[in-house]
Amino acid sequence: QAQLMESGGGVVQPGGSLRLSCAASTSINDINMMGWYRQAPGKQREMVALISNLGSTNYATSAEGRFTISRDNAKNTVSLQMDRLKLGDTAVYLCWSWNRGIVTWGQGTQVTVSS
């Protein structure tokens, strides 16, 4: 079972960009689904973007057109490029994977959008 470690969070002004990365401890070639969730204070955890091992993607409505998810099977990483960030994007972003019924979560990385 892969362990997931996120990086790339930080503080950015509205309209800015950040790129999050998730490094897996094992090969992700055969991991069915990987993606990003986020959780803001006082709110439920929500899906942001998912990507299958075939490259199919799915985005939350709030992320569509602003965020781009990608995976690099050779480097065992999944990335989330976030552009045109808004105040409402402030949250802890967690890397996630699902493979043969096993769900794995990373520890999360804080993204703060503030003017």
Image (spheres, rainbow, N blue to C red):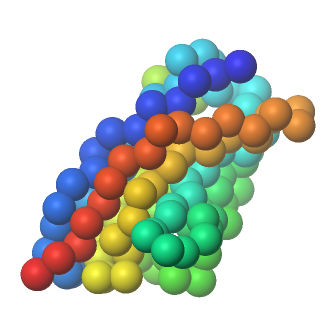
Q: Is residue 92 visible?
A: yes
Q: Residue at horizontal 54%, vertical 75%?
A: 43
Query: Where does residue 80 sit, x and y in percent of width and height?
Result: 43, 54
Question: Is residue 93 shown left or right of residue 84?
Answer: right
- Please, which residue is most extreme toward the right here? 101
- Please, which residue is most extreme toward the top here? 26
Q: Is residue 71 visible?
A: no
The quarter of the rendered structure image containing the N terminus is top right
Question: Is residue 100 shown left or right of residue 114?
Answer: right
Q: Is residue 110 above or below residue 33?
A: below
Q: Residue at horizontal 16%, vertical 67%?
A: 12
Q: Is residue 23 above or below residue 71?
A: above
- Please, which residue is most extreme toward the front here? 42
Front residue of 89/71: it is: 89
Q: Residue at horizontal 45%, vertical 69%?
A: 40
Q: Residue at horizontal 11%, vertical 81%?
A: 115
Q: Is residue 81 above or below residue 79?
A: below
Front residue of 85/64: it is: 85
Front residue of 54/96: it is: 96
Q: Quadrant of residue 92?
A: bottom left
Q: Is residue 78 above or below residue 115?
A: above
Question: Is residue 100 shown left or right of residue 94?
Answer: right
